[in-house]
């Protein structure tokens, strides 16, 4: 089908405009991350889109090497929150994937747990704020509050629906002949799952795990409610980066925001093929 | 053989069942109990002793008369009513531009879906910076209009609402685009070609052939966004904290505030339960309709 020149130019114009709108906020933050303190709040004619005197001071600052320009010293550096984010999101992902994958296989092959699909969608439906107060009470009772494992446990449950649904559609799509052949050979059902199915599903498992990790990494509200000091995650730490003396530490926050934004964007490109499936609970495949 | 399968299936689904039970049944019962009392974490007693502050249904009648709650609900509905249709139309428009191949398609696609990968709290911070009165948004507007614009986006009640909606539209239009494009690509080519041969114009083809085949997908996309939009918290809270005053206070922000600042957890539990019940009914109703 040949398209008219008018349509082609309209298409490129529209797409370029959309790309510009997508990029402006990201580029502004990236530029802010490299701006020295004098340029943070420059306005009017002084407002610059590209830093006049680019510097790495903001990055040095959040990692604890205080620079003379930034008067306030930080209570803590960004290292621990970055570790907290990785640990809680990582362990939460492992938990969700383990429970989700085995349940998905159980349902897909043996029809067990027929209540799970609906129950898990419902879990996703509720605003976290409406179910978090009992969790906060329980976590305080178990002294899970402000710990990476307490956070990881909640993350594992919150993202379980995604892990389950994604893996269920992958298992449903998988040809059953190989499993059946192994069964005829005398393998037990459990061995088939562990030794044949799982290794075969390595790629889908990895995509699902990355998808779940992005979701866990993106959380703000749950960490805000369940961590206070020791194990705050990057978004919570970032929001706390302002003081009565200096106001908002624009550049330092932007530097941290840039660090937080990199992993999901990179992982997201890696699993692009499966994004639609993941986001629609497997209702739609690409 | 059958027995072995059933046993294995049970064992495999057990962890997920335990987790679901753990996060739904126990908290639900606890919330039901606390919602009938005046208990607060500041009361000095553990929640098990909440019965000493029994107030029967006082919390629930408070919910009915809580004008701040209803205003927050109305605001959430307003954000939903603006953002979801705008995201849908923009996403659909963009998706139609991506239906056939053109040079640079893959790169453009990768860039356009980036916003939804950005951590919402970070996106909130981006837009917090953009909407400062001396910030880039006013700078761009000044250049376009030719005279200095100094709108105080985040401290004006109406503009603040516009700002948080803009952030939501920026972040979630790509989701609509992604899902709708997957749907558009799935529409069989031969039907479109047949219609073209019969002389149907592109708009006519779109309305009579493409849209009806996309019904289910459009339904899914809208449902996902409506559900997520109802929960809206991260971006908005970072940008405005629900302010100025209560100008951008949504349902999640309101519950967050009364739970962490006023600490009236008996009342929080009552609100939460009412929301859970209403949402469950809506969910069952929607699923029944979809099944038809």
Image: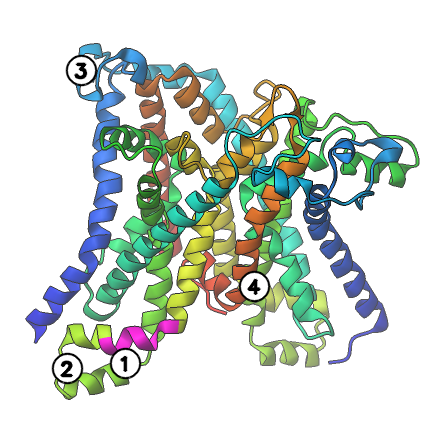
Check contact, mark 2 vs mark 3: CB within 8 A.
no
Q: Are marks 4 and 3 on the same chain?
A: no
Question: Residue B154, image x and y in percent?
Answer: 68, 27
Element carrying mark 1: loop
Residue at numbered disc 1: A176
Residue at numbered disc 2: A187
Residue depicted at 7% across the width and 76% down the height: B1
Q: CA distance from mark 4 to mark 1?
A: 30 Å
Mark 3 is surrounded, within 10 Å at the Cα level, by few (under 14), some (14 to 19) or many (20 or more) other residues, namely some
Residue lying farthest right?
B146
Q: CA distance from mark 1 to mark 3?
A: 56 Å
Q: Is residue A188 above or below residue B154?
A: below
Q: Quadrant of the N terminus of chain A?
A: bottom right
* Mark 4 vs 1, N-terminal side: 1
Q: Chain of mark 2?
A: A
Residue at numbered disc 4: A269
Question: Residue B171, image x and y in percent?
Answer: 60, 47
Element carrying mark 2: loop
Mark 1 is surrounded, within 10 Å at the Cα level, by few (under 14), some (14 to 19) or many (20 or more) other residues, namely few
Foreground: disc 1 or disc 2: 2
Residue at numbered disc 3: B51
| Majority secondary structure in the magenta region | helix
Rendering quarter of residue A25: top right
Q: Chain of mark 4?
A: A
* Mark 4 vs 2, N-terminal side: 2
Q: Chain of mark 1?
A: A
The boundaries of the magenta stretch are A195-202
């Amino acid at each position: 089908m040949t398209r008219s020149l008018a349509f082609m130019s309209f298409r490129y114009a529209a797409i370029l405009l959309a790309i510009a709108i997508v990029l402006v906020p990201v580029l502004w933050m990236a530029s802010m991350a490299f701006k020295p303190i004098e340029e943070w709040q420059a306005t009017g004619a002084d407002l610059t889109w590209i830093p006049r005197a680019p510097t790495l001071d903001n990055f040095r600052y959040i990692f604890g090497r205080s620079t003379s320009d930034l008067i306030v010293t930080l209570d803590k550096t960004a290292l621990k929150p970055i570790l907290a984010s990785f640990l809680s999101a990582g362990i939460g992902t492992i938990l969700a994937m383990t429970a989700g994958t085995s349940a998905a296989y159980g349902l897909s092959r043996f029809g067990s747990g027929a209540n799970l699909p609906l129950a898990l969608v419902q879990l996703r439906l509720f605003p976290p704020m409406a179910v978090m107060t009992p969790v906060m009470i329980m976590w305080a009772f178990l002294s899970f509050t402000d710990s990476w494992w307490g956070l990881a446990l909640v993350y594992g449950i919150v993202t379980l629906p995604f892990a389950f649904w994604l893996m269920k559609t992958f298992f449903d799509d998988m040809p059953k002949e190989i499993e059946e052949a192994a069964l005829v050979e005398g393998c037990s059902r459990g061995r088939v799952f562990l030794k044949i199915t799982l290794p075969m599903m390595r790629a889908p498992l990895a995509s699902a795990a990355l998808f779940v990790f992005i979701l866990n990494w993106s959380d703000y509200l749950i960490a805000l409610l369940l961590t206070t000091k020791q194990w705050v995650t990057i978004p919570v730490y970032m929001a706390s980066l302002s003081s009565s003396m200096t106001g908002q530490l624009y550049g330092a926050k932007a530097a941290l925001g840039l660090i937080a934004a990199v992993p999901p964007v990179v992982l997201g490109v890696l699993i692009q093929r499966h994004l639609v499936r993941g986001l629609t609970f497997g209702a739609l495949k690409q | 053989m059958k027995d072995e399968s059933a046993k294995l299936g049970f064992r495999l689904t057990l962890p997920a069942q335990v987790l679901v039970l753990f996060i739904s049944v126990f908290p639900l019962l606890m919330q039901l109990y606390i919602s009938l009392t005046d208990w607060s974490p500041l009361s000095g007693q553990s929640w098990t002793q909440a019965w000493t502050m029994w107030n029967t249904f006082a919390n629930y009648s408070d919910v009915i008369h809580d004008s701040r709650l209803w205003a927050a609900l109305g605001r959430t509905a307003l954000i939903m009513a603006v953002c979801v249709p705008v995201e849908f139309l923009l996403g659909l428009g963009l998706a139609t531009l991506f239906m056939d191949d053109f040079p640079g398609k893959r790169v453009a696609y990768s860039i356009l879906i980036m916003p939804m990968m950005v951590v919402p709290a970070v996106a909130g911070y981006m837009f917090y910076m953009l909407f400062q009165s001396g910030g880039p948004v006013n700078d761009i507007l000044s250049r376009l209009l030719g005279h200095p614009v100094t709108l105080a986006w985040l401290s004006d009640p109406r503009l603040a609402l516009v700002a948080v909606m803009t952030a939501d539209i920026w972040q979630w239009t790509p989701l609509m685009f992604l899902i709708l494009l997957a749907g558009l690509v799935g529409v069989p080519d031969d039907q479109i070609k047949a219609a073209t041969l019969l002389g149907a114009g592109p708009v006519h083809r779109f309305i009579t052939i493409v849209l009806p085949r996309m019904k289910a997908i459009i339904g899914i996309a809208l449902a996902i966004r409506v559900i997520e939009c109802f929960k809206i918290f991260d971006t908005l809270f970072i940008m405005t904290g629900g302010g100025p005053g209560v100008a951008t206070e949504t349902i999640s922000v309101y519950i967050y505030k009364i739970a962490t600042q006023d600490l009236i957890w008996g009342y929080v539990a009552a609100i939460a339960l009412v929301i859970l019940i209403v949402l469950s009914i809506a969910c069952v109703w929607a699923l029944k309709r979809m099944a038809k």
